[in-house]
Image: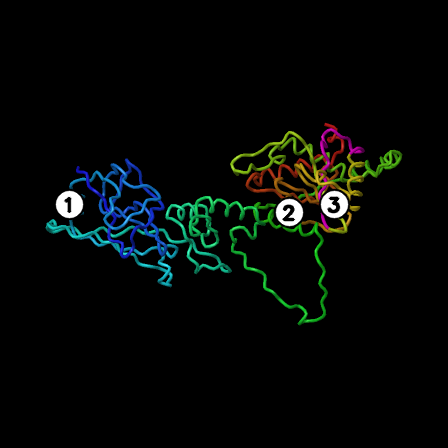
């Protein structure tokens, strides 16, 4: 082993260039052609490679220093064999990625040549130089962005951006002369995550074509309501980011519907309209208790499940301006009469545009009921960060086989459509949840348990 000096090689006409990044520190082991540092002039940036292998003994420069060809960079503890290799004529040539191109070249890539002067007594039969390692390639930009514009960033920032899937051509640099820093990449990623899912990171979704529909006939332009704009973006995000699975089932509500009708007079005396939705909420809470993973949300890190000890249930409410989801809190602590009263009050407020924002927050689970309108089945979209939603369609009379009597009987069947986030809930639990709901709704006495 011997201590060798590593000098800045011939870097062409560049003099007094600034050291903008050091990629090594004392104690690091280097292979031949490993990058030691990055220097930058007003025209180009380039990596300086190690001429031979060894262990970094001491750095002789720091970030911000000015160097030229022949400047001492560091001391390298090199094996004698490596030192012998270094004595051979070496000419290193590598192609820098387009973000490091000489601005005057006008091409997508620039070639920077670094040569080590020939020693006066070259070693005989020196081995051929080790070819330079593959340099990181810039992340390609998606269509619609100016990928020809070079991104000004160091190799380490490029590696960091590549790990996060960031496109440097879309990141605005805040460093000297617009250089992209690590913090710029982090800020860009955060901004992308805040966008609707179809826009974030350009998910490969082809933009909708711009068509002049008036060429085909008379048209009228009508602006979307504010609620539809907001809910549309959220629904799009939820559909794209949460892997949906929908479990379909039917519940026999013959006895439940008979009981509900028998309670109408008493409910009317209390000023309440007793609807099926109030019973559905009680049944859902019973099922949430039995299967806590449905009463949960994924943590922001995607690695933990936040299990909720409260039971706030939202319901989709159709208004003239669009869909809103009021939340009935602590359903487990209320009877069906109290729930029915609250459902009516919140629905009226929603349709009168008087529903407060906090009345639509904190939900654990959502019910979307289309029974009063029609339809047989549908696929409801999860109201993230919830992990499941129950869709309810129009009930209908169907012949159901009675095993005991060995005959078909007319029964009122309620179609159920349970959508759930497959990252949290598997198919078996989805089926168990709907089976539990079916049992609750088929025997109203179970809701008292």
Position in image of residue 311 (x %, y %): 68, 32
**Quarter of the C terminus within the rendering:** top right
The residue that mark 1 highlights is: 84
The quarter holding residue 348 reads top right
Marks 1/3 in contact by CB < 8 Å: the verdict is no
**Quarter of the N terminus within the rendering:** top left
Q: Residue at x 70, y 56 (%)?
A: 224
Numbered badge on residue 381:
2
Question: Which of 171/18 is in front?
Answer: 18
Position in image of residue 365 (x %, y %): 66, 38
First of labels 1, 2 by sequence position: 1
Question: Which of 260/244 is in front?
Answer: 244
Q: Residue at x 54, y 56 (%)?
A: 205
Q: CA distance from mark 3 to mark 2?
A: 14 Å
Q: Residue at x 58, y 41 (%)?
A: 427
Q: Is residue 324 magenta?
A: yes
Question: Which of 141/258 is in front?
Answer: 141
Q: Where are the magenta residues, as a range?
A: 322-338
Question: Which of 329/246 is in front?
Answer: 329
Q: Is residue 383 magenta?
A: no
Q: Label 3's element? A: strand
First of labels 3, 2 by sequence position: 3
Q: Residues within 10 Å of mark 1 (few under 14, many from 20)?
A: some
- Furthest residue in direction top, as rendered: 449
First of labels 1, 3 by sequence position: 1
Q: Residue at x 30, y 45 (%)?
A: 36
Position in image of residue 443 (x %, y %): 74, 34
Position in image of residue 313 (x %, y %): 70, 37
Q: Label 2's element? A: loop
Q: Report the mark closest to the observer, 1 or 3.
A: 1
The residue that mark 3 highlights is: 317
């Amino acid at each position: 082993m011997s201590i060798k000096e590593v000098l800045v090689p011939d870097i062409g006409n560049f003099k007094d260039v600034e050291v903008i990044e050091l990629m090594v520190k004392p104690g690091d082991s280097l292979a031949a052609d490993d990058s030691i540092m990055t220097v930058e002039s007003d025209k180009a940036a380039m990596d300086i490679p190690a001429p031979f292998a060894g262990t970094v003994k001491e750095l002789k420069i720091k970030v911000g220093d000015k160097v030229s060809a022949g400047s001492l960079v560091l001391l390298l503890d090199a094996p004698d064999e490596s030192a012998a290799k270094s004595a051979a004529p070496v000419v290193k040539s590598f192609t820098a990625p387009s973000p490091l191109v000489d601005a005057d070249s006008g091409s997508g890539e620039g070639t920077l040549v670094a040569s080590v002067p020939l020693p006066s007594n070259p070693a005989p039969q020196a081995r051929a130089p080790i070819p330079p390692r593959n340099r990181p390639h810039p992340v390609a930009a998606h269509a619609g962005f100016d990928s020809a514009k070079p991104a000004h960033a160091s190799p380490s920032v490029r590696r960091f951006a590549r790990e996060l899937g960031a496109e440097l051509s879309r990141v605005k640099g805040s460093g000297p002369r617009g250089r992209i820093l690590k913090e710029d990449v982090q800020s860009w990623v955060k901004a992308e995550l805040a966008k609707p899912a179809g826009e974030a990171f350009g998910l490969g979704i082809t933009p909708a074509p711009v068509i002049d529909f008036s060429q085909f006939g008379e048209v009228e332009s009508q602006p979307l309501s504010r609620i539809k704009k907001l809910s549309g973006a959220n629904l799009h995000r939820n559909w794209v980011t949460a892997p949906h699975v929908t479990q379909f089932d039917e519940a026999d509500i013959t006895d439940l519907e008979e009981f509900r009708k028998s309670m109408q007079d008493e409910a009317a005396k209390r000023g309440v309209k007793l609807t099926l939705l109030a019973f559905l909420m009680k049944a859902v809470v019973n099922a949430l208790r039995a299967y806590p993973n449905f009463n949960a949300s994924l943590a922001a890190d995607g690695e933990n499940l936040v299990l909720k000890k409260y039971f706030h249930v939202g319901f989709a409410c159709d208004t003239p301006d669009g869909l809103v989801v009021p939340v009935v809190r602590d359903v487990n602590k209320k009877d069906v009469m109290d729930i029915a009263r609250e459902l009516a009050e919140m629905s009226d407020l929603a349709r009168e545009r008087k529903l407060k924002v906090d009345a639509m927050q904190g939900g654990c689970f959502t019910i979307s009921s289309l029974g009063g309108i029609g339809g047989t089945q549908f696929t409801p979209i999860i109201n993230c960060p919830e992990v499941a939603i129950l869709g309810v369609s129009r009930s209908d009379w169907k012949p159901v086989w009675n095993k005991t009597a060995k005959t078909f009987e007319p029964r009122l069947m309620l179609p159920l459509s349970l959508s759930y986030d497959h990252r949290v809930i598997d198919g078996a639990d989805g089926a168990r949840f709907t089976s539990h709901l079916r049992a609750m709704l088929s025997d109203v006495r179970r809701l008292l348990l």
